[in-house]
Amino acid sequence: MEIENLQNPDIRRLSDMKDIVFDKDWAESAGDKELYYMYRGIKSEGDLRYDITVIPALLMGKEFVKTKGHYHLNGSQEVYSVLEGRAFFLFQKGEDEIEDVYAVPASKGESVIIPSGYGHITINPDAEAALKLSNWINKNSIADYGPIEDKKGACYFYTTAGWIKNDNYKSVPELRFEQPLSREPEDLRFLK
């Protein structure tokens, strides 16, 4: 399947994410930029849906472009795989007091599992190359953007100066790093 041939994406614009951008001055003056593209329901297998997300090379002022971020209300998990480029996947558990936070750097061919109970965002840390991802998720999964919106972003921002804590949270542990999976799991039944 050629990513270039996909049509009719859902487009995430700056107006959808203005409140969660680190560089507020940039967000005020940038206009309503297109930040990334979601091609949902490209295929399905039973209760699972396959999507592709394309995150262009872009700096949002001092911050690298990212997804809006959300939690799964029904505790469902998700699997992401990097098709092209590099990614930072940021995972956080808790809403005001973060119990755990970690990032997983991943490159082409590598995958991550979004664990139950964790909010997550995806960052394109390369200002010169697009990031293309696929994901498998249960069709009945419900995304909750509220907790991340309420805190004006995830508990860390990835910027040109590195990782910066979001001071809107009551407490945030130090960021740790985990390794990605070397490939997508063959058995996806745990997502059902």
Image (cartoon, rainbow, N blue to C red):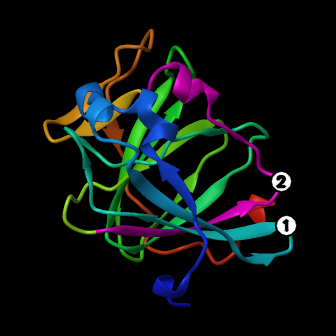
Q: Mark 2: which secondary structure?
A: loop
User: Residue at coordinates 27% horizontally, 34% vertically from top-left?
Assistant: 29
Residue 140, numbered label: 2
Q: Mark 1: which secondary structure?
A: loop
Vertical relation: 167 (above or below) 19: above
Residue 35 falls within the magenta-colored stretch: no
Residue 180 coordinates in the image, percent (x, y) = 41, 61
Query: Where is the N terminus found, in terms of image quarters?
Result: bottom right
User: Residue at coordinates 86% horizontally, 73% vertically from top-left?
Assistant: 46
Mark 1 highlights which residue? 47
Residue 91 coordinates in the image, percent (x, y) = 48, 40
Q: Specify the quadrant of the image occupied by residue 56.
A: bottom left
Residue 18 appears left or right of 31: right
Q: Which residues are magenta?
A: 130-153
User: Residue at coordinates 50% horizontally, 33% vertically from top-left?
Assistant: 92
Q: Nearer the viewer, residue 78 or 57?
A: 57
State if disc 1 and disc 2 touch (CB < 8 Å).
yes
Q: Specify the quadrant of the image occupied by residue 28.
A: top left
Residue 150 falls within the magenta-colored stretch: yes
Residue 179 appears left or right of 113: left
Residue reaching furthest top? 170
Q: Three-letter amino acid code at disc 2?
A: Asn
Query: Where is the C terminus found, in terms of image quarters?
Result: bottom right
User: Residue at coordinates 31% horizontally, 70% vertically from top-left?
Assistant: 85
Q: Nearer the viewer, residue 15 or 75?
A: 15
Residue 36 coordinates in the image, percent (x, y) = 45, 58
